[in-house]
Image (cartoon, helix red, strand yellow):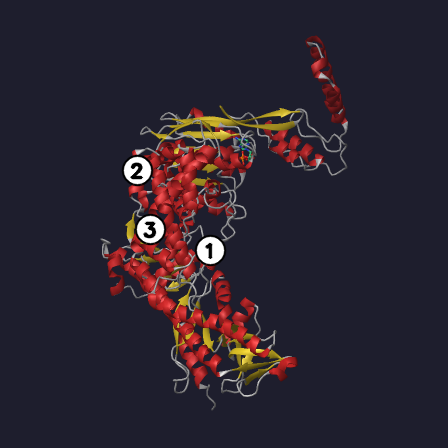
């Protein structure tokens, strides 16, 4: 029986280590893939599939990508959620006996990419892990390998653990095989498909210092699992990893993923784009680090009053000092992504340009410090003192690297003159040699009288004297040794030229090597200072977010909120921050919201499209903004500090998980009812809409009663079930409000103004009319409506005959007799009346006449 060739056998052995990744197997200048990997990669990457002999009868499918272009292909695979294992030759082919040794040097996975092309600048890129314990508690750890930040938390239930992972937008989740099946299913249902297994969770020595301070072993185990995975995949220094901190999910304002989605905090519901979200509105940060921190703040608003007020105070200082703020913004603009630069230094993939960026960033710090001090506010002086400009690093890099270095670090030409004596010597030799060559060229021209004679250089032949064929006869015999023949010229070398060439090339080669050595020393020196750089990055990002809040608050006329312990909501002239920005500030109708201990719940009625959802969301967003430490879109705002916010929208389609819409609606409602406390804010938008009218209404009422009687959370409940407005008679703390609309010329005009009391009408049919539904259909709906409103729930089905242009309108709530044209006369008579022109007496007469007419029509039926 034939067997595979030694190379294919080697491939299969390595591949067995990484069954779930594409194996990029280095062969010469290519990374090759074989077997199924080749079939799949050729499809995913649209590259040509070929085949090669592998020692057995059938050819082996193969495809490959050039080594120098691999990064782009890897990026494509990672973006699609795949993993890639890089297998390199680990010995010199010249020394190798038999097949060259090859090993996996790195695994690139969606959660561990470090290549800046795959990293979203303004987003963290988390690798998370979930561990379940015997007592049914869970731990969630997360790590951003690009910045080195890691955190871990104990979480009470599996569902909440999943929520946490979804909220982190983890790119990849590492699980132990014992929790895997159940957790994996839930994660996949929520759109997280990149899942990896790691059962080893003992603490590796080199990472011990990162997790040592975690108090509970459960936390340590979970983080250790994650670190193990990072270690196993990256196989290199991860010195930039920062100490893992533990946190409690209850120390922040909690919002489950659906609530966040409904509030459009980081992306919009439709289109999942960033534009139109709160992050989009707020993004006035000047650095990528600031943008990422702001996102994290939005994900976790505070509940500690002192901390919130601390942030607000700083925002206020920035707000009041426009000019200094502008200078600060300019300074921040010059600060590159210190966090990720530090990560790349540790990882070993920085280049000279990165180090120049680092230097330039550090050189901005003194200016930033000075600007803060000039603000003449004690808080800012404190902030300034927290900044370490790392002058030693900045000075070192300034002395070492030229301003615009090339990308490659192995080809030299980026270290400054006078940085290193030995390097200067090589350079002198090389430069002198080069000027000597220029002189030689001149000398040869004079000697031979050939003006076109030139001295050139190429990699293969080295230095040469080039003479065109026409001038060859002039050259003296003997001294010129032929090296290369071109169509029109010959190239020669002389002993003198040869000697200098050796000198120059040696000097060039040595200086390139030395530059690389010096670069590595620089990198190691910077690497030792990573903790300082990370601390600086942290302080800078905080300042950036605070100035961003001040900038947005000033531009959009926000005010500083205050907080009260009585759980009062008092918002004067509140606005929905995003809707206001998108439409024109002039057109936005501000609304108050007042809720105290006698009003825990607002029942909001009003036509569709009048602004109920917008109003409810504006209250929630105002609270979120306040609790992240930003000013709020209102003329005045006093708020409670909410512990949780729930936002529920009736009948939201959840196609991802494939659950019935009504089931989703009820599951969401259940979650809110189970977890809301008296200190929560609950928004129910048209809940109960996903089922039949009576069912829905009954459920809506039961939910209202439950929240009112048993939870007491501040609740905004919008509904189109008018029947519910009567609840205010029974529920002491429920207050009716409505969004006003007026009817003009048969059209409804939305005023978007919240007013006391219930809405008197549902304007649904008018909205349908605005949407240009056919006139006959609108008429029929009006007819049915009158029937319903008069208590006759069963209106006869529509006549099948062609209707006249005015349709068939039942006047008295009676069903319209089929095929009878008689009531049409009645209708025409009424339509013809010009009521506004009638005197009261005439009106009485008309009414009398119409009544008579109606009687005769009914009798003659
Ligand atoms: P509903 O929930 O009552 O169906 P929405 O809250 O979805 O209505 O509002 C519909 C549209 O009305 C919004 O997209 C917005 O353009 C506009 N709108 C809502 N509130 C206001 C307001 N206060 N001022 C101006 N326009 C508003």
Mark with earlier residue (1, 3): 3
Nearest-to-viewer mark from 1 and 3: 1
CB of residue at label 2: within 8 Å of ligand 1?
no
Position of residue 210 relative to residue 445, above or below, is above
* Marks 2 and 1 in Cβ contact (< 8 Å): no
Of residues 392 and 638, the one nearer the viewer is 392
The percent position of residue 807, horizontal first and vertical second, equals 73, 31
Residue 747, image quadrant: top right
Determine which residue is flagged by label 3. Answer: 157
Residue 65: in sight, yes or no? Answer: yes
Determine which residue is flagged by label 1. Answer: 191
Q: CA distance from mark 2 to mark 1?
A: 46 Å
User: Could you say whether the residue bearing mark 3 is in a helix, strand or loop?
Assistant: loop
Determine which residue is flagged by label 2. Answer: 381
Query: Residue at horizontal 30%, vertical 56%?
Result: 529
CB of residue at label 1: within 8 Å of ligand 1?
no
Query: Residue at horizontal 49%, vertical 87%?
Result: 55
Residue 506, image quadrant: bottom left
């Amino acid at each position: 029986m034939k067997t595979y060739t030694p190379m294919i056998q080697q491939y299969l052995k390595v591949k067995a280590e990484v069954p779930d990744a594409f194996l990029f197997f280095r062969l010469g200048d290519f990374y090759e893939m074989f077997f199924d990997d080749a079939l799949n990669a050729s499809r995913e990457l649209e590259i040509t599939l070929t085949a090669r002999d592998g020692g057995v009868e059938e050819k082996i499918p193969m495809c490959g990508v050039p080594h120098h272009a691999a990064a782009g292909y890897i990026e494509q695979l990672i973006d699609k959620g795949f993993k890639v294992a890089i297998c390199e030759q680990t010995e010199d082919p010249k020394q190798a006996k038999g097949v060259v040794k090859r090993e996996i040097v790195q695994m690139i996975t969606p959660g561990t990419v470090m290549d800046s092309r795959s990293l979203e600048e303004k987003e963290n890129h988390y690798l998370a892990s979930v561990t379940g314990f015997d007592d049914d508690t869970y731990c969630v750890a997360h790590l951003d390998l690009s910045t080195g930040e890691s955190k871990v938390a104990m979480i009470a239930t599996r569902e909440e653990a999943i929520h946490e992972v979804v909220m982190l937008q983890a790119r990849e989740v590492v699980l132990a095989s014992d929790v895997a099946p159940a957790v994996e299913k839930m994660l996949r249902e929520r759109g997280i498909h990149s899942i990896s297994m790691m059962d080893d969770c003992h603490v590796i020595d080199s990472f011990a210092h990162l997790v040592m301070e975690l108090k509970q072993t459960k936390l340590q185990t979970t983080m250790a699992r994650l670190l193990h995975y990072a270690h196993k995949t990256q196989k290199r220094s991860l010195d930039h990893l920062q100490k893992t901190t533990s946190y409690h999910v209850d120390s922040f304002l909690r919002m489950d993923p659906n609530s966040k989605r409904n509030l459009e905090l980081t992306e919009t519901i439709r289109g999942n784009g960033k534009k139109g979200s709160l992050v989009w509105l707020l993004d006035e940060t000047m650095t990528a680090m600031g943008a990422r921190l702001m996102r994290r703040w939005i994900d976790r608003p505070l509940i500690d009053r002192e901390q919130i007020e601390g942030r607000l105070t700083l925002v206020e200082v920035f707000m009041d000092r426009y000019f200094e703020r502008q200078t600060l913004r300019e300074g921040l603009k010059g600060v590159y992504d210190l966090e990720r630069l530090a990560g790349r230094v540790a990882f070993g993939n920085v280049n000279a340009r990165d180090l120049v960026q680092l230097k330039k960033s550090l050189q901005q710090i003194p200016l930033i410090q000075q600007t803060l001090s000039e603000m003449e506010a004690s808080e800012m002086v404190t902030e300034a003192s927290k900044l370490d400009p790392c002058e030693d690093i900045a000075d070192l890099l300034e002395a070492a690297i030229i301003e615009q270095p090339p990308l490659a670090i192995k080809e030299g030409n980026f270290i400054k003159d006078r940085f290193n004596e030995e390097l200067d010597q090589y350079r002198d030799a090389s430069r002198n040699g080069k000027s000597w060559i220029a002189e030689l060229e001149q000398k040869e021209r004079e000697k031979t009288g050939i003006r076109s004679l030139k001295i050139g250089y190429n990699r293969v032949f080295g230095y040469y004297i080039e003479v065109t064929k026409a001038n060859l006869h002039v050259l003296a015999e003997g001294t010129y040794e032929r090296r290369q023949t071109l169509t029109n010229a010959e190239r020669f070398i002389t002993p003198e030229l040869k000697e200098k060439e050796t000198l120059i090339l040696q000097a060039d080669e040595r200086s390139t090597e030395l530059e690389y050595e010096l670069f590595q020393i620089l990198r190691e020196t910077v690497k030792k200072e990573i903790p300082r750089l990370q601390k600086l990055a942290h302080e800078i990002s905080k300042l950036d977010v605070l100035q961003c809040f001040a900038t947005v608050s000033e531009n959009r006329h926000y005010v500083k909120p205050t907080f009260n312990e009585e759980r009062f909501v008092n918002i004067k002239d509140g606005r929905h921050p995003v809707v206001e920005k998108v439409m024109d500030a002039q057109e936005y109708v501000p609304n108050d919201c007042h809720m105290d201990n006698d009003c825990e719940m607002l029942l909001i009625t009003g036509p569709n499209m009048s602004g109920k959802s917008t109003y409810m969301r504006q209250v929630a967003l105002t609270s979120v903004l306040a609790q992240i430490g930003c000013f709020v879109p209102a003329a005045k705002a006093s708020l409670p500090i909410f512990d949780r916010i729930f936002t529920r929208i009736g009948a939201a389609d959840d196609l991802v998980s494939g659950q019935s819409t009504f089931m989703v609606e009820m599951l969401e409602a259940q979650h809110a009812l189970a977890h809301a406390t008296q200190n929560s804010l609950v928004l129910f938008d048209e809940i109960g809409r996903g089922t039949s009218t009576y069912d829905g209404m009954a459920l809506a009422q039961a939910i209202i009663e439950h929240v009112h009687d048993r939870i007491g959370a501040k609740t905004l409940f919008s509904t189109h079930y008018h029947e519910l407005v009567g609840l205010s008679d029974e529920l002491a703390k429920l207050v009716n409000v409505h969004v006003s609309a007026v009817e003009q010329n048969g059209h409804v005009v939305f005023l978007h103004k919240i007013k006391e009391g219930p809405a008197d009408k549902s304007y649904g049919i008018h909205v349908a009319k605005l949407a240009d539904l056919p006139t006959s259909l609108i008429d029929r709906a009006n007819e049915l409506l009158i029937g319903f409103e008069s208590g006759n729930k069963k209106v006869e089905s529509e006549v099948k005959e062609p209707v006249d242009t005015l349709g068939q309108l039942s006047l008295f709530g009676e069903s319209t007799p089929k095929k009878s044209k008689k009531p049409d006369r009645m209708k025409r008579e009424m339509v013809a009346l010009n009521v506004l022109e009638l005197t009261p007496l005439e009106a009485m007469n008309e009414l009398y006449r119409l009544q008579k007419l109606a009687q005769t029509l009914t009798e003659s039926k």
